[in-house]
Amino acid sequence: MATRIAAGVLGSLLLLPRPARAHPEAAPARTNRYLQVTLLESRARLAYTLLIGERPAFFLRQAADGNRDGRIDPTERASLLDTVATTVERSLELRLDGRPLVARFAERDSTGDDSVAAHALGVDLFAFVEAGPGVHELVVHDRYEPRDEGESEVTFDASPGVQLLATFTGRDGAHPAGPRFSWAAPRRSDSEDRTVGARFSTGRPLGRYLIAGVLVALAAAGIALARRRRASAARQKC
């Protein structure tokens, strides 16, 4: 019973409205990329989205069409996703509390037509990096350079129970900004620093606090009821 009550309260909190964001769209001749970093209780979830326009998507499908039948079959699509995920993994520099990390995008998905033609293509890659409880600093430097690169974006978002202490830009972390960082065009040169990061504090998840509070309240009520029953029984004996 206590678990059901706590789960209901937690569900209500998670369903509270959040600020709306415009859904990005693919540009016909560009590849736009969006990295959403969600800070969780003991780890961070990376959601890396590529919106590949008609022109670059055609060349990507063409390269993946191994049997040259003009369509991308499931095996070829999986190979395409493997190639993109591996390239992004090698290009995405991550540091947690000064230690280098490698994100493994084990979960992958794509949207778009299977024909080798000028149709937009969407690629979604998902990975987790472990952090553990405490105060942490996560630094992200995305060096991936897709064909016909367009706009780029990195966003940090804290889940319930996690406090987002600060977001910043620059390798030294001395320039407060964010939590949403965006660039309308590719880097002008290799010296352009697009490093971004976040400092955050994790602890026990909100659900555990709610469950613990409900259990304590129920226990206190049970003790009080037992005392009243004992007192009533004692009076009846007298």
Image (tube, rainbow, N blue to C red):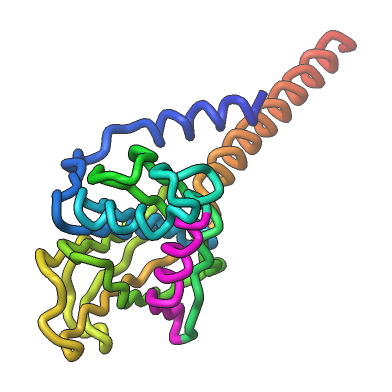
> Which quadrant of the rendered structure holds the N terminus?
top right
75 vs 72, left or right, is right
**Residue at position x 19%, y 48% from top?**
26
Which residue is more in the foreground, 136 or 43? 43
In the rendered view, would you say 97 is above or below 43?
below
Q: Is residue 184 left or right of residue 99?
A: left
Locate the C terminus by quadrant.
Answer: top right
Horizontal and vertical percent position of residue 13: 40, 34
Percent coordinates x, y for residue 148 in the rendering: 19, 65
Say whether residue 126 is visible: no
Over which residues does the magenta segment extend?
Answer: 79-98
Q: Is residue 54 magenta?
A: no
- Of residues 134 and 182, the one nearer the viewer is 182
Residue 206 in sight here: yes
Q: Toward which corner of the image does residue 192 lie, by quadrant?
A: bottom left
Question: Would you say the magenta stretch is mainly helix, strand or loop?
Answer: helix
